[in-house]
Amino acid sequence: MFDLQSLDDLSRLSESLDLECKLAQGLDGKGAVPKEFWPTYSAMANAHGGVVLLGVREKDGAFSIAGLETPVKVRGDLFNTLNNRAKVSVNLLTDENVIEAQVEGKTILVVSIPAATRKQKPVFLNGQPLGNTYRRLHDGDRRCDDDTVKRMLAEQLEDSRDNYILNKFGMQDIELESLRAYRNAFAVHRPSHPWVDVGDVDFLRLIGGWREERDSGVAGLTAAGLLMFGKWSSIAEAFPLYFLDYQERSNDPDSQTRWLDRIVPDGSWSGNLYDFFRRVIRKLTADLKVPFVLKGESRIDDTPTHQALREALVNCLIHADYTGRASLLVVKQPTGFLFRNPGVLRVPAAMALQGGASDCRNRTLHQMFLFINLGERAGSGLPKIIAGWKGEGHSISLADSFEPFDQTVLEMNWSESSLAISSATSAGSSPISSPISSPISSPISSPISSLKTEERIIQRLRDDPKCSAQQLGDALGISKRAVLKQIEKLKQQGRLSRIGSAKGGHWEILK
């Protein structure tokens, strides 16, 4: 985020995802809120927030202070428009968000725009959300298409996105083997529960997969019921953009094979969430070493690492926006794991990681997993992932982005010492234990820290070719400068190329 100390050295300023400069001189040269400020206000509010400097001139990437002769008037006009609902849908600013700063003997206004909450989005202009809603992408204000605005409105109005009744969908759309497998798991965890012996429709009703509206009498499968237990053809009919993807990848940049193993809905299995979970969790944990630990006379086969990966997979499934354009993607690779779900975070990443605040997108799905002892109660899921993963010395990051599609990415990477063990194992040594058996047959030849960062950048850009250096840094937990240094190295190696302009172009993975 922009630091006021940057104003002490204008050469340090550059317009970016979270900083914009406006001359704001007005027709008389004394200062006014420029009309182009308002798309920026909407764009930053609908993204991650940002700062606008009023009274700063930008020309060919260089900045100079123009100043405002009447900052009090500009400030007053700003708040007058913010409080006019015909002009702006919501005022997010208080007095503390608009401060005067003295630079080179001149006065400018520093306007800090916070990110809007889910209930406040979309932040739009001119009384009409369609066509007047913007979002900050890279360093520009982009007008949102109608589908994006409609998803924002749905997010605002629907606390849970999965409990509505699907018109004319019923038991004929359920994969009965999936439902029976779930019921068996339910009976194992709750053998004396009164729901164990009820019929399938009654059971679905009790867990939220079937619902009846009291007023209209309309009854049928809920979105959660179909997503969790449905047939692939039926799910695709109700959710045309729904797609689940598990990939096991090699870290070998010269490999001609993009994945070593893959699970997608291909007609050979149901394609629903419960079966995807059952198949993928086995893949994720297949290579994990289990220490010999006894509790009483029973061996404990569940480690903090197992628990963290299980929770991360459930977390990915219950927070996904199944109307979104990104696929749900789970990746296993020698450096660690990636969980990507369509839809951005409903609470800020820092708050989600800290725990205690939860805003689950699919609350019925969440409850279905809880019934069989999978997942955590509201607000404790991510903290448990962190405790189980970072407690073993590994790294973790969480970020969301809006381009090319709304998506959230959780990355869980092995520690460098763990990777060193994996490298040594593949080179032929026999360490006592290893967190994962690397599928690479030859030892890692470059330094682990360098390889790790380079490969993570390549993997990120493969998933999101339009990802900016700032977004890469945020996702990987490193500085923008470090990202640019690694990108330059990859370009020199002939592995990465930039196609198009800095703002509108994309990255191409060459090898």
Image: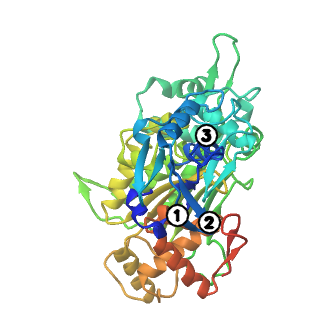
Please identify the quadrant where the N terminus is shown: bottom left
Q: Position of residue 242 (x, y in %)?
A: 69, 47
Q: Earlier in the sequence, mark 3 or mark 1?
A: 1
Q: What numbered label is drawn on residue 254?
A: none
Mark 1 surroundings within 10 Å by alpha-carbon count, few (fewer than 14), some (14 through 19), many (20 or more): some
What is the spatial separation of the Cα atoms under label 2 and label 3, in whole angstroms? 55 Å
Whether residues under marks 3 and 1 lie with C-beta atoms below 8 angstroms apart, the answer is no
What is the spatial separation of the Cα atoms under label 2 and label 1, in whole angstroms? 8 Å
Q: Earlier in the sequence, mark 2 or mark 1?
A: 2
Which residue is disc 1 drawn over? 64
With respect to residue 6, does 373 lie above or below? above
Secondary structure, mark 2, is strand
Q: Position of residue 414 (x, y in %)?
A: 41, 69
Depth order, front residue of 511/467:
467
Q: Earlier in the sequence, mark 2 or mark 3?
A: 2
Q: Residue at x 69, y 68 (%)?
A: 506
Whether residues under marks 2 and 1 lie with C-beta atoms below 8 angstroms apart, the answer is yes
Which residue is disc 3 drawn over? 228
Q: Position of residue 39 (x, y in %)?
A: 64, 45
Secondary structure, mark 3, is helix
Quarter of the image for residue 145 reads: top right
What's the amino acid at mark 2? Answer: Lys
Depth order, front residue of 261/453:
453
Which residue is disc 2 drawn over? 59
What's the amino acid at mark 3? Answer: Met
Question: In the orientation shown, which residue stands out farthest toward the left?
Answer: 296
Whether residues under marks 2 and 3 lie with C-beta atoms below 8 angstroms apart, the answer is no
Q: Residue at x 51, y 58 (%)?
A: 282
Depth order, front residue of 267/343:
343
What's the amino acid at mark 1? Answer: Ser
